[in-house]
Amino acid sequence: MNNELLNELTFFVLAIFVGIEVISKVPTILHTPLMSGTNAIHGIILVGAIVIAAGASSPVNIVIGLVAVILATTNVVGGFVVTDRMLEMFKGRQASKTPESK
Amino acid sequence: MNIAITLAYLVAAVLFILGLRQLSSPKGARNGNFTAAAGMVIALLATLPLLNFTTAGVTIILIGVVIGAVVGVVGARRVKMTAIPQMVALFNGVGGGAAALVAVAELLQFGEHPAFTVAFPSVFSIVIGSVSFAGSMIAFAKLQELMTGTPITYPGQQLVNGLLAAAILGFVIAVLAIASVPFSFISLMVLALILGVAFVLPIGGADMPVVISLLNAFTGLAVAASGFTLNNFALIVAGTLVGASGSLLTKLMSDAMGRSLANVLFGAFGQVRAGAAAVAGQEGRSVRSASAEDLGTLLAYSRRVIIVPGYGLAVAQAQHAVRELAELLEKRGVEVSYAIHPVAGRMPGHMNVLLAEANVPYEQLKEMDEINDEFKNADVVLIVGANDVVNPAARTSPGSPIFGMPILNADQAKNIVFMKRSMRPGFAGIDNELMYDPKTMMFFGDAKESLTKLVNAVKAA
């Protein structure tokens, strides 16, 4: 087992704990936006898609690369935009709440 | 790996973690989304200098990003608030598909005999990514009502699904041991796609949020696996964060429905039919239906009214009509509040979003625990397009698929007004005893039209 793989495994295991810890207190009303937000974050696969597409030269690689980039971009962009749309509603509600609670 | 790039990835990872934390509290949620998006931009920009682009590579990346961005923005902007769950499913599915394709491309580069440390994560990513892709598409089709939302089951289904999983496992071992590129990858992908479809088919539409959340976690893991293949720190950390938080979120969601995850995923087998048959045996009971005028008078002269909104309200786009009715009643001195079940609508939190959109005051939205003791003091409970969340079967009939789910105590109110399009059972596909309760009055029709009729009736009362 080489050093790089060992490092990667370390990140992997630590990220599991962080991922669980960081959202453990989420209220029910935020379940859907949070799911949508995490959904956007795994759009990081776009980085991978760009890496494999960048050096593409054979027809097979070009097709795979193109499809991967399209799918991954849709994931990232759509994911963040749709999450923002959901949270926009919450913000409106928070704003209307503040003046009344004063 | 270049130091600058590694540092940039580290910043991105920190931003993802901070973003997730902000996303889990109502105050900072929207900023959290921006924080995570900033992390994404940094990770993407940091990746570019590292690469040796071919002409074809640059072209397909530009074309791909433009197409993906247009589809993403238009899809996310145009989608109706009621259809957001299936949109999330769709965005999740394409992410899973991308993860699988990245792994395929990387494996092809390594030729006939990739090292185990490359082959193993790649194969994992291909299988999980494909399952997530196909499963998400079925979840989308079910929620979009392109296909039936009721569980699709047939005899021996579990055996078939088990065999599918076993075949995939066999293939994985074959790929890892023999690595006969590319034939076995394609077969593996096809099998995993079939498994994704087969896995989601027997799960009812009402449980789709939990399934989408699970598939979301799957995609995260597939992305992390692709990260191992590419030796990319950003993919590993971000993918794992999503895999872990997504798994916990899936558990929290099934907890909110009072069910175990296993029950959600495999509970449909046999139970629904038994439940439906038992109810069918009690046919011939009558329900009481009421006119708009009767109900208008009843509402106008009540002291306390609790509104239970459900998915039917969302479908009919009746959130503005319901607010109008509530405001009218309040002007007459009626105390109005909304009882929001944790899974009202189609996803936890969905109903809050819809009502907030219609400017319903935040103070009137009460969570289940907060309001459940107040139903007995309510003169009227107005159930608008909800069904399963007030179904007493969740308390009383152990054979029911929703047994054990915490429900709103609507049955304790003095009068129950059930607004529904028809006698059709709810999303979980089971009949609702509450409709036959002597205190219950049915008011059939489209939620929006019915509410408008009630508004006029209250004005006249």
Image (cartoon, coloured by chain):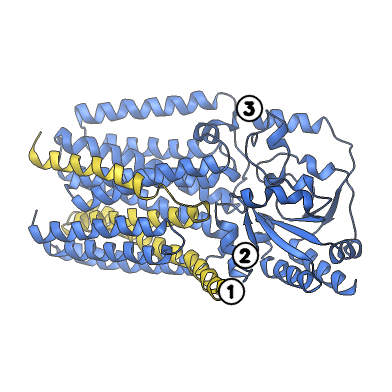
Q: Residue furthest front?
A: A102
Disc 3 element: helix
Closest to the observer, B139 or B246: B246
Which residue is denoted by mark 3 in the rendering?
Answer: B270
Label 1 residue SS? helix
Q: Which chain is blue?
A: B
Percent coordinates x, y for residue B194 in the rendering: 44, 37
Image-quadrant location for residue B324: bottom right
SS label for mark 2: helix
Q: Which residue is mark 1?
A: A100
- Look at label 3 and name its amino acid: Gly
The answer to which of marks 3 and 2 sits earlier in the sequence is 3
Q: Amino acid at mark 1?
A: Glu
Give percent across and percent down for residue B253.
Answer: 51, 44
Mark 2 residue crowding within 10 angstroms, few (<14) / some (14–19) / many (20+)? few
At label 2, the amino acid type is Glu
